[in-house]
Amino acid sequence: MKIIALLPARNESWILPTYLSSVKPLADEIIAINDRSTDNTRQILEDAGAKVYENSEFLKSGWAEFSTRQKLLELGRQSGGTHFIILDADETLSANFIKNGREAIERLQPGQKLVFPWLFLWKSSGFYMDDKRCLFSNNSKDIIFCDKPDLKYDYSFMHVDRTPGPKTPETIVNINKKDGVCFHFAYVDFKNSLLQQAWLRCSDLIQEKKNYVKINNKYYLPKGGDLNLSSVPGEWLKGLTLPAEPENLPHSWHLPAILDFFDKYGIEFFEPLEIWDISELNDEFIKRVGRKPKSSKAHIYLQPIIKLRRKLISIRNKKI
């Protein structure tokens, strides 16, 4: 058995020590594709012993999630990997999984994958979203799999499945919270996480023109203190290197990328999206158009239907 962690990365220096503290006890090797980072992402990874490639070695232009994940899998196979950990840089496995993780991974049969509760931390490492109204609660994510030669990723422009191959009762191995979870740290860096979500909404609208209600539903997040939270047990974090408070971090690459979208498609094309509570985007709209933007609110009135749908999906997933 050879366990390899496969990582796409771009400007992740703020969270890489956390990611590395999670995967290094489990993985025999780390392979990363660096996507035009302007910080010290590459240096941190190489100092930790990772093999780092530039995406320009494989892709002629920009970020392409499908191609990047498929290329990482090819590189992992070339390096002799039999089992793969597919975390993003802003994710970690919890301490209660890490202590017995290699044994759990070794028990997997070819084509099987470990599916973890996927907890989105909220503004700190101490709390996670536990609110049935939003996409980022009561979710699970397939993170680790045992390889088979015929496994490959199915194409998707965005949101490619984390592991290749089908999710069936025969391939799914669910992990209970008491045995381990996957933490998502994106909303710990709250300022940049909102920009990331805005970039995703804009990217989706470019691909699905006029489908703004669906897109706003997809990324719906209750605002302010209206979000229900739960505490993270201390033993789930024991031994992990937690990120420093990120208040003073510079803007991520998402802001200039969004401004590029505005230049290319016109800022009013994106007006129905619920992104204008971000001051930089709101100010940009006023500067370019001469008035405040008016995003669509139709998705808010659909939330009872969305809540019921997510409940039914959750019940179905538990039966798998």
Image (tube, helix red, strand yellow):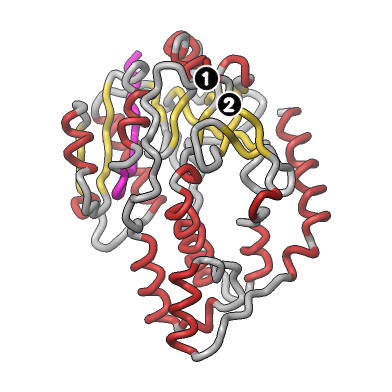
Residue 76 or 309: which is nearer the viewer? 309
Q: Which residue is at the front of the view, 47 or 162?
A: 47
Q: Quadrant of residue 45?
A: top left
Image quadrant for the C terminus?
Answer: top right
Q: Nearer the viewer, residue 313 or 257?
A: 257
Q: Which quadrant, please, contains the N terminus?
A: top left
Tell me: 122 left or right of 3.
right
Please give the name of the residue rendered at 80% of the width and 64% of the height, measured from the top-left corner.
301
Left or right: where does residue 6 sit relative to residue 120? left
Say which element carries label 2: loop
| Residue 231 location (% of width, % of height) | 62, 28
Q: Is residue 68 depicted above or below 19 in this figure?
A: below
Q: Which residues are magenta?
A: 1-12
133 sits left or right of 258 in the view: right
Label at residue 311 = none
Residue at image point 27% right, 43% down: 33
Disc 2 from disc 1: Cα separation: 7 Å
Residue 44 counted in the magenta span: no
- Circle 1 — which element? helix
Callouts 2 and 1 close, C-beta under 8 Å = yes
Q: Residue at x 37, y 56 (%)?
A: 64
Q: Amino acid at mark 1?
A: Trp
For residue 181, above or below residue 270 = above
The location of residue 26, given as percent across then percent down, is: 37, 17
Question: Which amino acid is tagged 2?
Answer: Val
Q: Is residue 59 left or right of residue 199?
A: left
| Residue 281: % across, % down | 46, 72
Q: Is residue 298 above or below residue 46?
A: below
Q: Which mark is residue 236?
A: 1
Residue 276, compared with residue 41, is above or below; it is below
Report the residue at 38% width, 81% height from top.
Answer: 263
> Disc 2 designates what residue?
232
